[in-house]
Image (cartoon, rainbow, N blue to C red):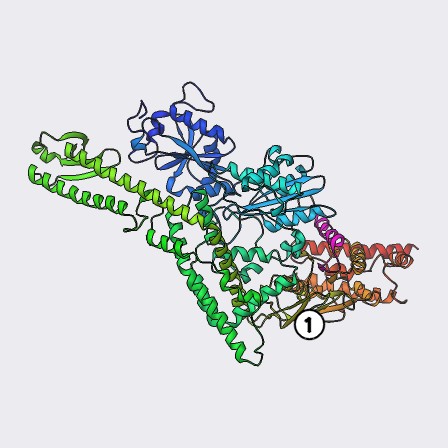
Amino acid sequence: MDADRKSLDAPANGRNAEITSNLTAVPSTRRASDTPLMLQYQELKARYPKDLLFFRLGDFYELFDGDAKIAAPILEVALTHRQQIPMCGVPAHAVDPYAAKLLKAGFRVAIADQMEDPALAKGLVKRQIVRVLTPGTLQEDTLLPAKRCNFLAALAIQDGTFGLAAIECSTGEFVTTETSGAGADSRTWDEIVRLAPSEIVMTPSPQSTPWIEKLRKQGFCVTEADASDFAVPLAAERLKKQFGIQSLRGFGLEGKNVAQSAASAAVRYYESTQCGRPCSLQPPRTYTLDEFLQLDAGTLDHLDIVESGAPRPGSGPGSSTSRSARTLLDIMDDTLTPMGGRLLRRWIVAPLRSLETIRARQERVDFFLDQRDGRRHLRAALQGWPDMERILTRLASGTVSPRDLAHLTHGLKRTPQVKNFVQKALDQWQALRNASADSSESPGSGLAQLPKSLPEAPELSELLERAIVEAPPASLKDGGVIRDGYSAELDEVRSWIRDGKSRLLGLERREREQTGIGSLKVGFNNIFGYYIEVTKTHMAKVPANYIRKQTMANGERYITPELKEFETQLLGAEERALRLENALVTSLREAILKEAETLRRLSAAIAELDVFLSFAEVAERRGYVKPTLEDSSSFMIREGRHPVLENVLASGSLVPNDVHLDGRERQIVILTGPNMSGKSTYLRQTALIAILAQMGSYVPAAEARLGVLDHLFTRIGASDRLLEGESTFMVEMVETARILNHATPRSLVILDEVGRGTSTYDGMSIAWACIEYLHQAGPKVLFATHYLELTQLAGQLSGVCNAHVAAREWGDQVIFLHKVEPGPADRAYGIHVAKLAGVPKGVLERAAKLLRQFEQRQRSQETDPQPSLFDEEAGQTRAQNDTLTSGWGDELSQIDLNQITPMQALLKIQEWKNRVLQAKKEEDSL
C-alpha cells in the first residue's frame, strides 16, 4: 500500500480518496514534490502526449490538467480542482459514450486501466494504457454503427501517382489501389469520398500538404504520420513480415510502390493504437477503379445515394436504421444482419461494369423473388444473426466478450438450418421448372453452388454449445461463463464454493447459538473481507476470541481465526474458478481461431444471402422489374419512377416517365419546362435506375434495357454546397469541367441548369458550347435548361432531341402534369411559380405586365429568320440591337424564388424600369 494511505485505489464510496491523499501540487511538469500517483500518470501521459488520457481511479476514469480543461465542456461534466489540479471524471461503466463524444470532437483517447485488484495491491496500483481510440481504428460495437464500415485510410502521393489503402479495423478487411496518369487526382478524390474513411493517415510533403488541407476543409479527419511510415524501400518488407510471405505478387501489389507505401503506413498506424495486441488483418486485396461504374464525388452528393460523410463514432449498433428513408440506401436496405447491411452499402456506391457478374447477381434475385416461402423462412432464420466478422476480429485481438462467444455459438447452431432452407428452395425451384414446358432450364452454376457456399463447422459448434452458457455475463471477470458439466475441475471448485456458502450460513447460525446474540450476522466487503457484526446492545456478550476489526456507529465488526480461514479458502476457490474459466475461454478462443477462415467464408456467404433476399423483398413490395443489361449504347426506360420519392409520396401520385437515349439518333436530350414541373426528379430517377441496374438489383420501372455505363456524371444544382471562398458559379463550373474532361461514349451525363449562376448571355453561351462539346465526345446526355434558345440545337446537330415537362393552363392557373413529352417547352411559367411561392400580388402583376412588354418588343424586332446563336457576326449584331430586351423573360424565370425577398423583387423591377428609361433616352438622343 502507499505510505500515506492505507486503502489506496479502493475508496469505499467514490473516486476521490486516492486523489485527495496523493495530489499536492499542480503537475504541469514533473517535479520532485509530485506524488507517486501523479508520477505514474505523467509517465503514461508522456507516451501519448497528443491523446486525452482516461486514468482509472476506482470506479471512475479521471482526466487531469489540460486534458480535463479540454474534455469537461465537451463531456458536459464539472471541471473541479483538487489541491489546485484541474480534473474531471466519468463513471468507468459508461466510459464508451463519453469517449465517443471526444472522438466526434476530433480527439484521440487513451485509456489507462488498473491491472490489479486495488484491495490486493502492494503499494501503488499498477496501471497501463490498454486501449487507444481513434476515429478509424475502433472495434467496439458500442462505438460503431452496425451497418456501416469504419475505414482507416492511408494516402501516399509520389510524382503524380496516388496510392490508397483502407483497413476496416473492426472486420480486418484490407484493400489497396494505385492510380496514375491523366485525371488520377480527381479519381483518387472520388474514391476517398466513396470509401468515406473515418480517418486518413498522411505525411506532410510538397505534394500531399494541399491534399491534407483540402481533406480537412471537406470534413475528413486527417492524422499526420512520420515520413518513415511511408518509406517505399521499407514498405514491401513490412507487408511481407506482417503476412508471413515472401512475395507481394499474390496480393497484386508487385511493382505498385506507391500503393505499398500507403498499405504499409496504414498497418503501422493501426499497430500503434493496439497497445501490443495483434492486428487482425485479412490479406490485402488490390483493385482497380475500372472495375466499377465511376460515381464522382458530386454525383454521390447530388443523388443522395447514401448519407454523406464519415461514420460518427458512438452512433451505436442500430443507428443506421433510426431515421426516415431519404437516401437510395434507405430504400434498398431491408437487410437483417450487420454484415449484409455493410455489404449492401459497399455495392450501392460501387456498381459493377462486368456484365457476367451483374447477371449472376440478377439470377440470385430472380431465384429468391420466385421462392416466396423459402425467402420467408430464410429471412426468419437470419433475424438476430451475430456479426461474425467483428466478433472474429475481437477474438484475434483478445478483446472478445463472453456474450460475443454466445452470439457466435447461436449463429453456428443455426447454420445447418439456413443451408437446409436454401437447398429446399433450390430443389423446389428446379422441380417446378422440370414440370413446366421449359423443362430444359436448369439452375446456373452460381445458383447450384448456393448451399455449398455456406460452410459449416459442426465440431466447433458442438464444442461451443457444450461450453458456453446461454446468457453469459458481459465480462469474464464476473464468472459464470462456462456451463456446468463442461470441466470436471471447474465443477469441483464451484461445488466447494456452493458448499462453502452453505457452511458460512451454518457458521452464522452456530455463532448465534453459542453467543446468544440473535441479531449477529456474517457479512462481507471488498476492504475488510468477511466479518461478524454485533450491535452495541449485545457488546457484553462478545466472546474473548473475537478480534475487533472495525467500529461502526451502531456496533462493532469482528473476525475470528475460523472465519479468517474460511475466507481464505472461499476467496481462493473463487479466484481459482475465475482462473480456470479464463483458461477454458482461452482454449475455446484458440479453437475458434483455427476455424477463422471457415467462419469468414460463412460470414461473407450470409452477408450476400442477406443482400439478395433484401433485393427480392424490395422488388416484390415495390413492384420493381428486372432490367436487361447489355454491351451496347442503348439506354431505354419505360415508365421509370424515382425510388425514394415514390416511397414518400402517396400511392399513385408519382407520374412515371420514359427515357430513351442511344449513341446515335438520341444521344442528347435537351429537357425544358417550368420550375416545379419535375425536371430534376426525372434526371435523378434516371441516374438512380442506372445505379440500381448495375449493382444487380431490380429497378422501379415497367421495363428497362440499358447498356453498361463506365461513368455516371451529374451536375444537379438544387442544393449547391459551396467550397470555402468559391462562388456558386465557380462550383458549378468546376463540376462541369470535370464532366467535360472525363466523359466517354460509354458515359451517362446528367446536367441541370448549366450556366444559371451568371448573366443570361454568359450562361446561355456556356450551356450551348457544353452541348456542342458533349456532342463531339459522344456520351449519352440529359440536359435540363431554362434557356429555350438551346432547343434550336435539335435542328443543327444530329442526335440532339428536345423534350419538355408538360404543363397546361386552366383559366388563370397552370397545372403541372409532370409528364415528359417530345418537343421543346413553349413557356417558362416563372411568374406562376412566383405566385405559388407567395410573391406579393402587386409584384406579380407588375412582372406580368413587364413580361408582356418584353415579349412584344422582342417579337417586333425578330423580322429576320433566327440566326445561329454563335454565328459571330450575327451575334454581334444581335448584341448591339437587343441590349435592352433580349432574354428578359428568361432572366425573370431564373430568379430563385426560394431566396428572393419582396424588397429584392421590388428593387429588381426598379432596375428594369431604369434600363427601359435609359434605353429610351439613348434612342431619343440619336
Tell me where the magenta segment starts and ends, as one range: 726-753
Residue 102 picture location, percent across and down: 49, 40
Is 336 displayed left or right of 874 in the figure? left
Is 537 displayed left or right of 157 in the figure? left
Which residue is outermost to the top?
32
Residue designated by label 1: 812
Helix, strand or loop under label 1: loop
Foreground residue among 654 and 200: 200
Which residue is outermost to the bottom?
437
Which residue is outermost to the front?
246
Residue 210 picture location, percent across and down: 67, 39
Residue 690 picture location, percent across and down: 65, 63
Foreground residue among 253 and 172: 253
605 shown above or below 193 = below
Q: Residues within 10 Å of mark 1 (few under 14, many from 20)?
A: few
Foreground residue among 438 and 681: 438
| Magenta-span inclusion, residue 751 | yes
